[in-house]
Each structure stands twice: as structure tokens, then as C-alpha cells.
Amino acid sequence: MPKVERYAVIDEPVASPWTHIAVSPTLPLFGFMLGGAWLGWTWFIVNSHAFGSATRKLETAVALLAPLCAAGLFVGVEALGDRGVLSPQALPYALLVVVLFKLATVYWLYNTQARSFALYEYFGGRRRNAGFVLVLGLLFGRDLLESLPVILQVVFQ
Amino acid sequence: MDDESRLLDHAGRALRAGQPQRAVQLLRELLTRDPHHAFAHALLAICLHDERRLEAALHEAQLALTIDPELPFAHYALGHIHTSRRAFKKAKEHLDIARASEPDDPHIALAFARLYDHQGKHDDELVELERARAHAPSDPDVLSALGEGYMERRRYAEAEEMAVAALREEPEHAHALVLRGHLHLLRGSSGTARDHALWVLSSDATHRGALLLLTAVKARSSIWLGAWWRYHSFMTSIGEARSTLVLLGAFALYRVGLVALAQQGKSEAQGTLMLFWLAVCVYTWVGPGLFKRALDKELATVRLKDDF
């Protein structure tokens, strides 16, 4: 007898072989704050696939495009400073746009992933406690970034 | 009654009993058998809406309308969902279509009332609530919704009257009990308000309104928890996108402050600002945990009824 597929609601997580590394989306959010944007974005991508988030493709696209857009913003603000449109005093304020943009992407990723993760847990999915990644990010994240060119430091910090 | 009708009936009952998760399970079973059941898709949309799964709810309601474009219930569901998404124009369009098919349905009047409430048109909201009552004068759902409308307009005597009328029709009506609890709380009787919340929770341990009432009672007991609760209620009421903007705005102000103080060489003030920001972050992070612990203690005292 052929197996009948259960009716699936579109926002429910799909089966994944990587559920053993699924964590609460709060951890990637903390990863962003403590270790830097590189850790937050990467962890959000891994986590969305680990627990089979219903919006994992969109989340992955946002997390991959975010550094490119942040770099674009940084280059744009620097160019405005070089051409004299922004005074040296105004430049630090304008550069806050890059920080706010990165924060906005992470808030969006967190909110989107949290909805799907709540359903994943409702259906019996387990979460892993990966606090050690945060500790590693806090201890070595900033040091790793310091060896990079300035633009990459601004984007991934 | 065939199996599909039975599943639909049970799902409707589960939803009315405030158990949308159970209703979703039943409707999933029905839709596995018949994926083109328009009414089941629309009912599933309402259940998902009650679980605050708005994108999925919208998808299901649109599926229902694709299968049966004339189904008034699908338009009603879409009106409800668009109201929650704050797409007010679309919500009104769908509710108008639903009303054209079923002009005397009190639930459509309630949906209009909700839409006007979200839009801040409170006079129109009361007109719709009165209209719902005219169509169903003894429906406890309608009476308690009207009572809530009165309470929000600070017409407490009329609100009390509606709550009593609803409880006369159905002595254990959860919404009416919660409404009375809120009225007691407004009069300063925290203990009685708490009893009303626990009464509802003894029949339905997950009743959202009763949990909110209990939370409001707890918020009154401590200034710090109360402040967090008001902050949380505000952020929830403005929606996810706007609350994110508020958070980003607050962060931007903080960073602008830091840059400005650094440029003026006021490093001491900079340190104070950083400490203040840290305190705000810790408070908003720890607040929910403390609140949850206080509520858990209270909920542990609830004795569920034998027929729960």
C-alpha cells in the first residue's frame, strides 16, 4: 500500500539529518553580539538547515547577502567622506549605518528563525546547548578579525 | 455523519474551546484525505491565526479562496488575518464581501469591531459590537466582547453588566470570567482578579486570556516586573517590524550618544552611558525569566478540574 503524505502546513520545519546540532536562535544572536557578525550570520545559516526551518532558503540568502550589502554601505560612506560630502566629524555618525544594517539583518534572522524553531520544538525537536561556541567566539573572535583588512573588520565585526 | 464531517465538527469544537493546536491536528487529518476541502482550509487558517502563525494562516485562507472563490468563511478568515497583519484596506474588502453574503452573522460584526479597534476607530468598533449583540442577544461570546469594548472605553458599569449577562448564559464562560477579573483588577481587587484567572485555568490550563490576566495581576505586585510587563505589552502591540525599529532606534541613539561624548572628550559620561545601556540590556533580558518564575509558582497552585 503506498504511503500517504501527511498534509503539511507551509511554516512547519522539514525533516533534517542534522537536528543534533540544532540550537535555540538566541545562541546565534548572542554569537553576533559576543563573537561578531561573522559568527552570527554563519550560525544562523547552519542552524536553519540543522532543524529544517521552513524559511531556510530565504534565511540563507539574507545571511549571505548581508555582508555584501554591509561592505557596499561601508564603501559608500567612505566615498562620501573622501569627496568631502561628509565632514570628518560626521563620518563616525554615518558609519553607524553599517552597524545598524548588520543589527537589522540579525534581528530579522532571529525573529524568522524563532517562529520556525518554536514549531520544531512543539513537534518534539531537541535543542543543543552550545554555549562553548559563544565562549570560543568571545575569546578568539575579535583576535581573528584584527588580522583582516579594515573593510572586512567593519563588515564581520 | 461521514468521517470528514465528523473531523470538521470536532475541529470547530476544539477551536471554540480555545484549543487551536488540537484543531490543527484534526484539520491536518481531514486535509490529508481531501486536500481540496475549501472550508477546512479556511478553518485551518483561523486556527493558525489564533496560534499567531500569520504567514501560514494567510496561505491557507488564500488556498480556500482559490478552491472556492465564493466561500464567505474564507473571506471572513482573510479579513481576520489581514487585520492582524495590519493590512486594513484588504481586511475591510474581504469582510465587506463576507457581510454581503451573510449580513446577520454576529461573528462578522465582531471581526469588523476588531478591525476598527486596530485602526483606532473606537466609535465604529462599539457600533459593530452593538450590531453583533442585536443579531445574537444571548451569545456569551458577543456579550463578553461587547463588555470588553465598554471596558476599554472606561464604561465599567456597562462592562460589568455585559460580563454578568454572559455568565448568566454560561456560568463558566472563560472570556466573561476573564473580563470580570480585569474589572476587579481595575478596582484594585488583585486577589479576586487572581481567583478569576485561576478559575478559568482550572478548566483550560492554556487559556491565553486567563494567563494574561494572571500576568497583569503579577505585574501589579512589583514595580520592576510591572515596568517590564508594560514595555513588553507595548512592543507586542505595535507588531514585530515596528518593535524591531524601536529597538534599532534605541541602539542608534545610544551609539550616537557614545560618538558625541567621545568627540567632546567626556569619557566619564561615556562610561556612565555604557553602564546605563548595560543595565537596560540586563533588565530586559532577566525580566522575562523572573516573570516566568513568578507565574510558574502561581500556576503550580492551580488544581485542574476532574474533567480537564
Image (cartoon, rainbow, N blue to C red):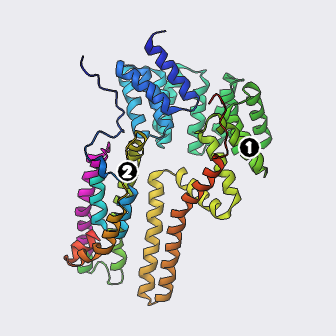
Question: What secondary structure prevails in the magenta region?
Answer: helix
Furthest-top residue in this view: B1
Could you tell me which quadrant the C terminus of chain B lies in?
top right
Query: Which residues are drawn in magenta?
Result: A49-77
Q: Is residue A90 magenta?
A: no
Instruction: Please say if B102 is above or below A67.
Output: above
List x then y, in percent, for residue B109.
60, 29
Instruction: Please indicate whether residue B27 sits to the left or right of residue B227 in the image.
Output: left
Check disc 1: other Cα within 10 Å, few if <14, some if 14-19, many if 20+: some
Instruction: Please indicate whether residue A108 sits to the left or right of residue A58 in the image.
Output: right
Give residue A129's quadrant in the image: bottom left
List x then y, in percent, for residue B296.
60, 50
Check disc 2: other Cα within 10 Å, few if <14, some if 14-19, many if 20+: some
Give residue B137's quadrant in the image: top right
Instruction: Please indicate whether residue B35 sits to the left or right of residue B2 in the image.
Output: left
Figure disc tally: 2
Q: Which residue is mark 2?
A: A127
**Which residue occupies the foreground of this view, B182 or B224?**
B224
Q: At label 2, which amino acid type do we have?
A: Arg
Q: Which residue is mark 1?
A: B195
- Quick check: can you spot residue B223? yes
Element at label 2: loop
**Which residue occupies the foreground of this view, A44 or B45?**
A44
Element at label 1: helix
Q: At label 1, which amino acid type do we have?
A: Asp
**Which residue occupies the foreground of this view, A26 or B185?**
A26
Instruction: Please say if B123 is above or below B263.
Output: above
List x then y, in percent, for residue B260.
44, 82
Q: Is residue A69 magenta?
A: yes
Q: What residue do we see at 69% from left, 42% from top?
A: B198
Q: Chain of mark 1?
A: B
**Which residue occupies the foreground of this view, B289 or A104?**
B289
